[in-house]
Image: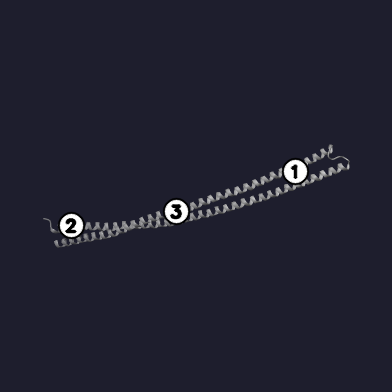
């Protein structure tokens, strides 16, 4: 029959194995949860930094778009001012051309009347009757020439005047068209500013949410680590008690 001492050796060995297993579970599990908690904390910091960056980026892009909108509005004002200024200059030139055309017509009429008066005086001094024959034909030709010159001058003035008015109208239209295009661009830029701002906030909110999830995971890992410590300590105490009890029994059995 085996001695009591040898009979106790098996339980003691088993208790020792349980103690070592509890020790490794205690240290290994706690270390693993500690790593998980550290990783979760790092991820939370990273997500929080991303949230700050997205907020900053959205605001910066929104400010840039708003600045572009202000520039576009200023360009619209300048386009209208330039268009109106050029149109005013063209219309002033038109008024000058019309006045000059009238003055030329007056000068031509005056010169024609003077020429006819001179011809009449010469014919009268020569004893030729101005109202008939070749003298009349010459005077009629002179009158026709004067009328033709006046018509040519008036037509030229009207053409130039119409051209200047068209340029004035074109300048106003071009200025207004450019202004409207700039105003439309300003609206687009402001819409972009709003989109940039909201996009930045949305991305920041998503990053903040991810950070909160990481924080929750870290808290869970911390809780599990604490629970692991408590469980491991309990197992160590139990295994240690069993080992001591077995060892004491072996000593008594000798």
On residue 210, the disc is none
SS category of the residue bearing label 1 = helix
The answer to whether 216 is drawn above or below residue 155 in the figure is below
Query: Which residue reaches farthest top?
Result: 133
Question: In the image as oriented, which residue stretches furthest toward the left?
Answer: 1
Dot 2: element: helix
Give me the residue at 80% from left, 45% from top. 113
User: Along the polypeptide, which appears first: circle 1 or circle 2?
Assistant: 2
Residue 150 is tagged as: 1
Kindly tell me whether residue 254 is visible in this rendering.
no
Distance between mark 2 and mark 3 Cα atoms: 69 Å
Disc 1/disc 3 C-alpha distance (Å): 72 Å
Residue 11 numbered mark, or none: 2
Q: Earlier in the sequence, mark 1 or mark 3?
A: 1
Residue occupying the point 30% across, 59% down: 223
Res 227 seen here: yes
Residue at the disc numbered 3: 198
> Which picture quadrant has residue 53?
bottom left
| Residue beneath the point at 15% across and 57% down | 7
Instruction: Locate residue 107 relative to residue 129 in the image: left or right.
Output: left
Residue 205 placement, left or right of 147? left
Horizontal side of 108 relative to 198 (left or right) equals right
Give the colour scheme of this rendering: one colour
């Amino acid at each position: 029959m085996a001695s009591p001492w040898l009979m106790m050796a098996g339980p003691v060995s088993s208790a020792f194995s349980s103690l070592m297993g509890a020790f490794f579970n205690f240290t290994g599990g706690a270390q693993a949860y500690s790593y998980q908690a550290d990783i979760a904390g790092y991820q939370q910091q990273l997500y929080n930094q991303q949230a700050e960056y997205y907020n900053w980026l959205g605001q910066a892009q929104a400010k840039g778009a708003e600045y572009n909108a202000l520039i576009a509005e200023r360009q619209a004002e300048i386009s209208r001012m330039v268009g109106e200024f050029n149109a005013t200059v063209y219309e002033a030139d038109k008024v000058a051309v019309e006045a000059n055309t009238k003055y030329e017509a007056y000068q031509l009429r005056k010169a024609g009347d003077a020429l006819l008066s001179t011809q009449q005086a010469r014919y009268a001094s020569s004893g030729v009757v101005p109202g008939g024959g070749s003298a009349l034909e010459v005077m009629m030709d002179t009158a026709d020439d004067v009328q033709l010159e006046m018509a040519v001058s008036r037509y030229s003035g009207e053409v130039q005047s119409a051209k200047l008015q068209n340029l004035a109208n074109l300048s106003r239209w071009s200025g207004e068209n450019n202004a409207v295009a700039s105003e439309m661009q300003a609206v687009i830029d402001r819409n972009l500013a709003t989109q940039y701002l909201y996009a930045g906030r949305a991305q920041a909110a998503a990053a903040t949410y991810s950070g909160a999830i990481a924080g929750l995971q870290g808290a869970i890992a911390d809780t599990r680590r604490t629970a692991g410590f408590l469980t491991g300590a309990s197992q160590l105490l139990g295994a240690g008690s069993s080992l001591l009890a077995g060892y004491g029994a072996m000593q008594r059995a000798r």
